[in-house]
């Protein structure tokens, strides 16, 4: 059936809120201090899982309703949340951060490209050009930081590419489980926190936040970028226009850099202005269908997609 008029706008709003929260990730991470990566994920994902569990229990959802998911859904959720972060941290260990991040930020473009074969969406020129402009913006931002790719870091670049595929596949394939409530994210965050704790104990030395402000930054990470953002994103990719969401996601590194500048942790550059213009143009172009005929022109609900119809058969 056709999505009701305006039904996608709340989902797109949720997706934009998730992107804004992820934009705060870098600044909050710096404020939290030198906490080891897997320890940070374990701590923040535990907070993110807790807010989902509390929300579900308050609504009368029992424990069975929080963990009784099929194995393939568990695999998708843990592979997306834990798999992405594990690959990301490994990539940062084996390649320069700027270059690794540039490869990692192929994931919004991959979301757009994969939405056709995996989610049954129709791709138009505006989606492809919009996502391309977004990636060009990230490239401009990276060039402003002096990126330089060399063969010596090939493994790190490969792992960063794995990050991009992990998150894009998680985002697009989540659409196949449109009937699954967002409560499931609490379970996936909890499982990812446990796996991250295991990796921390195996590979890292424990370093606790050094001040009350640092602890507050960790809490804010768990409530926002590593908590609420995942719930918002789940709702967005299941009910929104995933093609436009892919292009909009390129705002994340721009917002992140802007916040670092506002906090006095980075210097403004001309590359940032160019990147912001490219990303904005790409986002407007990719989401133009949302502004036509009440916001749902050319959009098809997850339940009406060819993938969903095939699953019902």
Image (cartoon, helix red, strand yellow):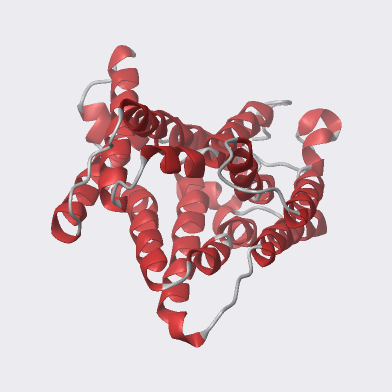
In the rendered view, would you say 58 is above or below 21?
Answer: above
Image-based side of 227 in relation to 23, left or right: left
Towards the viewer: 120 or 292? 292
Image coords of residue 158 (percent x, y): 45, 75
Towards the viewer: 124 or 98? 98
Image-based side of 267 in relation to 157, left or right: right
Residue at 64% in and 29% down: 13
In the rendered view, would you say 116 is above or below 22?
Answer: below
* Count of marks overlaid on the render: 0
Image coords of residue 23 (percent x, y): 56, 41
Image coords of residue 168 (percent x, y): 51, 56
Image-based side of 30 in relation to 83, left or right: right
Image coords of residue 113 (percent x, y): 64, 62
Residue 313 visible in the displayed image: no
Farthest residue, direction bottom? 151
Q: Quadrant of the N terminus?
A: top right
Residue 260 visible in the displayed image: yes
Residue at 72% in and 41% down: 299
Residue at 46% in and 67% down: 160
Towards the viewer: 5 or 134? 134
Image-based side of 135 in relation to 207, left or right: right
Res 231 → quadrant: top left
């Amino acid at each position: 059936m056709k999505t009701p008029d305006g039904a996608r706008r709340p989902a797109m709003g949720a997706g934009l809120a998730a992107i804004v929260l992820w934009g705060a990730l870098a600044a909050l991470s710096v404020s939290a201090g030198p906490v080891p990566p897997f320890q940070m994920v374990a701590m923040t994902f535990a907070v993110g899982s807790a807010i989902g569990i509390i929300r579900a229990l308050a609504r009368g959802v029992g424990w069975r309703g929080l963990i009784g998911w099929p194995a393939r859904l568990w695999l998708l959720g843990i592979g997306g949340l834990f798999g992405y972060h594990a690959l990301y941290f490994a990539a940062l260990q084996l390649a320069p951060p700027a270059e690794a991040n540039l490869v990692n930020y192929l994931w919004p473009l991959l979301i757009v490209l994969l939405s056709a074969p995996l989610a049954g969406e129709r791709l138009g020129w505006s989606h492809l050009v919009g996502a391309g402009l977004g990636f060009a913006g990230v490239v401009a931002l990276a060039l402003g930081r002096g990126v330089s790719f060399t063969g010596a870091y090939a493994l790190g670049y490969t792992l960063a590419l794995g990050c991009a595929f992990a998150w894009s596949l998680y985002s697009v394939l989540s659409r196949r489980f449109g009937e699954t409530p967002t409560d499931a994210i609490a379970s996936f965050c909890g499982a990812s926190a446990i796996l991250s704790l295991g990796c921390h104990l195996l590979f890292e030395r424990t370093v606790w936040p050094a001040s009350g402000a640092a602890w507050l930054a960790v809490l804010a990470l768990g409530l926002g970028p590593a908590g609420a953002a995942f719930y918002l994103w789940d709702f967005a990719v299941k009910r929104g226009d995933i093609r436009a969401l892919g292009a909009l996601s390129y705002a994340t590194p721009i917002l992140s850099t802007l916040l670092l500048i506002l906090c006095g942790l980075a210097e403004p550059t001309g590359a940032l202005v160019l990147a912001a213009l490219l990303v904005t143009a790409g986002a407007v172009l990719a989401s133009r269908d949302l502004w036509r005929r009440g916001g749902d022109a050319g959009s098809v609900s997850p339940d009406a997609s060819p993938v969903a119809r095939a699953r019902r058969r």
